[in-house]
Amino acid sequence: DSFLLYIKLAFNNSNKENLKVIIKRFFKCYSALNIVIKELILLILSYSL
């Protein structure tokens, strides 16, 4: 849902600088989420062993 919102914001605003900021923010959020998911998987694996 938020990903679609980012796309809508990007297309509604033709300002390229704004688009760069939106993409950077999205990837920052995504990479942080990715780290959390990896940590959770490792935690689950360590408990199941």
Image: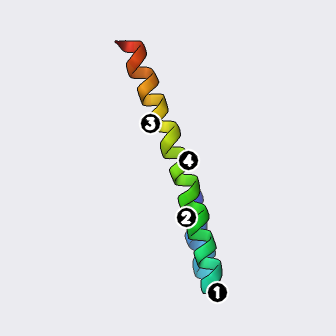
Q: Answer with left or right where residue 26 lies relative to residue 40.
A: right
What amino acid does circle 4 point to?
Ala
Could you tell me if residue 1 is visible in this image? no
**Element type at marker 1?**
loop
- Circle 1 residue: 15
Measure the alpha-carbon separation of dots 3 and 4. Answer: 10 Å
- Circle 4 residue: 32
What amino acid does circle 3 point to?
Lys
**Element type at marker 2?**
helix
What amino acid does circle 1 point to?
Asn
Name which of mark 4 and mark 2 comes first in the sequence.
Answer: 2
Can you tell which of label 1 and label 2 is closer to the viewer? Answer: 1
Could you tell me if residue 11 is visible in this image? yes
* Residue at x 59% of width, y 58% of height: 2
**Element type at marker 3?**
helix
Measure the alpha-carbon separation of dots 2 and 3. Answer: 24 Å
What amino acid does circle 2 point to?
Leu
Mark 4 closeness class: few <14, some 14–19, many ≥20 residues within 10 Å: few
